[in-house]
Amino acid sequence: MRGYLATTPTELQAFLTNGIHRFGSAFVTTRSFFEENPDVDEEEREFELSWLAAQDSRIQQGLNESHGLVLAIDVTSAQVGKEIGNQIQLLSDVSWSQVESLLVSESAEPELTWYARQEIAAHLPQWLS
């Protein structure tokens, strides 16, 4: 299952350094989300969920001008906990090997820039500043 993790630059740096990190929840296509958006195709669902995670990232940082950072991960069935709205509770740590990509919102416009997992370390300093 594809999940989207809202993160902050500092949290992303710690995750990259340690190789594992404890995230409380992930945005996924829950039953509730699917019922509210029955006519939306998979690509649109994934964009909407990642956009919600980007907005959550900004809220976590407490800055409207900050970058919204979202990790797209493969969630294992053993990690899936209770559904809460558009999110699931994560029952265990996430490993760096589960990361597929990073999506970055750079403005209030609903646009996300995609970075491969291998590119994250090179771009991290710009998000930390």
Image (spheres, rainbow, N blue to C red):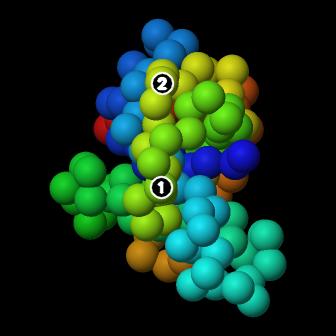
x then y, percent, for residue 78: 62, 29
In this picture, is 112 found above or below 116? below
Residue that sits furthest to the top in the current view:
18
Residue visible at 57% across and 50% down?
A: 4
Which label sits on residue 13?
A: none
- Residue 31 figure quarter: bottom right
x then y, percent, for residue 123: 56, 35
Residue visible at 59% across and 57% down?
A: 28
| Three-letter code for the amino acid on which mark 1 is drawn | Glu
- SS at mark 2 in the image: loop
Identify the image quadrant of the C terminus.
top left
Which residue position is annotated with label 2? 92
x then y, percent, for residue 86: 49, 65
Which residue position is annotated with label 1? 83
Residue visible at 69% across and 48% down?
A: 2
Q: Nearer the viewer, residue 21 or 33?
A: 33
Q: Mark 1, mark 2: which one is toward the viewer?
A: 1
In this picture, is 75 found above or below 17? below
Q: Nearer the viewer, residue 119 or 73?
A: 73
x then y, percent, for residue 24: 37, 38
Between marks 1 and 2, how big is the CA–CA gap?
15 Å
Whether residue 128 sits left or right of residue 27 in the image: it is left
In this picture, is 112 found above or below 36? above
Whether residue 73 sits left or right of residue 20 in the image: it is right
| Three-letter code for the amino acid on which mark 2 is drawn | Ser
Q: Nearer the viewer, residue 123 or 3?
A: 3
The earlier-in-sequence mark between 1 and 2 is 1
Mark 1: give few (<14), some (14-19) or many (20+) Cα within 10 Å.
some
